Amino acid sequence: QVQLVESGGGGVQPGGSLRLSCAASGRIFGIYVMAWYRQAPGKQRELVAAAPSRGNTNYADSVKGRFTISRDNAKNTVYLQMNSLKPDDTAVYYCNAELLGSDHQYWTYWGQGTQVTVSS
């Protein structure tokens, strides 16, 4: 069974930094994309950043220049380095991945979510 396990959330003051990690485990035969989404209270889930296996990384306009997504393919892990955090970045952050299964189909998986709170 494939799982995405996140870590690294917490509380931080405005201007601070956090690093989120998400490790994919299980029978994985390939990765199409790994990404981070977030959902603030009362708002829809939105894409924060994506790192496809082919092509360029892309970011939401609201985080460009502050957040960096990266991957360690040997560990099937994706990271989100978040700098210059703002109160508006407060949300539950979800790891997302499209992974190739033994049936040669790509399947979408979600992590359990990790809370990021930016407050003074």
Image (spheres, rainbow, N blue to C red):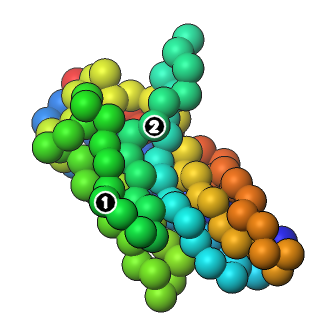
Residue 41 seen from this side: no
Question: Counting residues from the N terminus, which is met first, the one under dot 2 or under dot 1?
Answer: 2
Q: Amino acid at mark 1?
A: Asn
Q: Which residue is mark 1?
A: 56
Do labels 2 and 1 touch, CB within 8 Å?
A: no
* Badge 1: residue crowd in 10 Å (few <14, some 14–19, many ≥20): few
For image coordinates 31% across by 59% down, the residue present is 56
Residue hosting label 2: 47
Seen at 47% across and 48% down, the residue is: 36
- The residue at the point 19 percent across, 31 percent down is 14
The extreme top residue here reads 42
Where does the image place residue 63, in percent across and percent down from the top left?
Answer: 25, 36
For numbered disc 1, what is the local secondary structure? loop
- Judged by depth in the image, the label closer to the viewer, 2 or 1, is 1
**Which quadrant would the C terminus be assigned to in this image?**
top left
Residue farthest toward the bottom in the current orientation of the protein? 74
Q: Is residue 61 above or below residue 78?
A: above
Determine whether, in the image, residue 112 is placed left or right of residue 45: right
- Element type where label 2 sits in the image: strand
Q: Amino acid at mark 2?
A: Leu
